[in-house]
Amino acid sequence: MAMSIQLWTYEGDLEMLQSFGVEKKEKGGTIDSLTGRAARAGGRRGLLKSATKERGDEMKRLVFMLFLIGSIFVAGICEAETIPEAVLKAIVSIRATIPKEASTAATLGTERQGHGVLIGEGGLIVTIGYLIVESEKIEVLGPEGKTIEASFVGYDHETGFGLLRASRPISAEPMKLGEASKVKEGDSVIVAIYGGSDALVDARVLSRKEFAGYWEYLLESPIITAPAIANFGGAALLSKEGKLLGIGSLFTSFSIQGLGALPANLFVPIDLLGPILADLIEKGRPSKPARPWLGIHVEESRGRVFITRVTEGGPAEKAGLWVDDLILMVNGKEVAGIADLYRKIWASGNAGVEVTLDVLRGTKIQRVTIRSGDRLDFLMLRPKKMI
C-alpha cells in the first residue's frame, strides 16, 4: 500500500534544521545561516534578491537533506539499546484469516499478518485495524513463541485502530502508553516489531503534518518516521523510555520538493485510542455518531480530486458516481484537495445524510446526490466472538 505524499515545505525544512540544532540568526540587514547570506539592502531587491533566494533555497534543501539522512542513520543509533527486554515481550505477532466474501478481501487479502501490542489485562491487544477487520480466525504469537487463539474486539474506521483479545494469558506485562502529543519533528524514536531486541530500529520523526488517505481517511497529526521498515502493520512506535507512542499503519514516502523522496512509515498516535477505548471494548465500535461514508477511493493531482474506485454496493455506486469523475463541489462548495473534500463531506452531518457532489464527467458537469452510509455497516464485524 505504497503512497507518495508531499509532506514538506521550505518553512518545514527550516523547522527541521532547527530541531537538529541548526540555528537561524538575523543580524541587522542580513540573514545568516548555514546556506549563505541573503542581503536585504534596499537597492538590491529585484533580480539579485530573486536569484540569491533561489540559490539559497536550493542550498537550504540540500543541507536539510544531509542533516536528515545523517540524523536518521547516526544521531539516534543507540536509542534502541535502552529498551528492556521485558518491555518488548508485550509485542506479539498476529495472523488473521478473512473470508473471501468479506468486503475488504479484494483489496486487503484473506491472509493478513502483522503485529500488535499488549496494553491491558486479560490479553487485550491493540493493532492496526485492517489486519483483523472482518476476520473469521485470529492467532497471536507471544514471547514464548506459542500460538494463542484470539478474538476480534473492536474497530474504529476514523483512527484505524483495532482491538483483539488473546484467549489465554500472555507471559508479559502490558506496555505503558506514552504521550504522542509531545512527539516533535526531529525526535528520536524506536520502531519495534515482534522478535525482541533483534527487531528494533532507531528512527527519526520526519513530520507531524496531516495525512489524507485515498480511502476516506484523514489523520490530523500522524507520526511519519524514517528509515522505513517493510513489516510495518501493527508495529510499535516507542519512546526511549519504552512507552508506546503509536501503531504502524502504512509504508509511504516523505517528499522534499526538488530533491526527491525518502521511504517512510506512518504511525497512528496512541493518544487517539484513549477516548474510544471503552467503547471499542464494550460495543466493538465508537458510540459517537459515525461520519458520512460514500464508498470512494480518490486521487489528487494539482489540487483536483478524481475518483479512482467506487466500492461495489456502496452509497456512491448506488447514486451513480463513476471512476474518473472529477469532483468539483460538495454541497455547492468548491473542493481544494483530498483533505478539503473529506472535511466538506463530513461537515454535512452524520452517516445517512445526503451529500451532493458536482462532478465533471467527460465534458459535462453532473450533479449527484448520495445517501451516505456508515462504513462499519458495510463490514462483516464479529465483536467478542471467540474463534
Image (cartoon, rainbow, N blue to C red):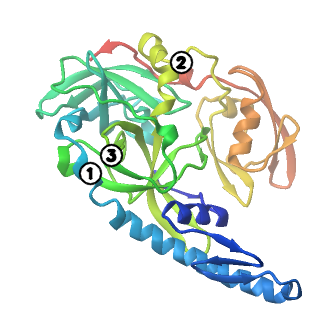
> Which sits in the foreground, 40 or 212?
40
> Closest to the observer: 194 or 244?
244
> Which residue has dot 1 on it?
80
Pair 2/3: label in front: 3
Q: Residue at x 50, y 41 (%)?
A: 182
Is 160 located above or below residue 212 in the figure? above
Q: Mark 2: which amino acid? A: Pro
Residue 336 drawn above or below residue 358: below
Label 2 crowd (10 A; few <14 / some 14-19 / many >=20)? many
Find residue 240 and name its label. 3
Q: Are marks 2 and 3 in contact (CB under 8 Å)?
A: no
Front residue (pair 366, 43): 43
- The residues bearing labels 1 and 3 have C-alpha atoms spaced at a distance of 7 Å
Q: Are marks 1 and 2 in contact (CB under 8 Å)?
A: no
Secondary structure of the residue carrying numbered label 2: loop
Give the image location of residue 7, x and y in percent.
Answer: 59, 57
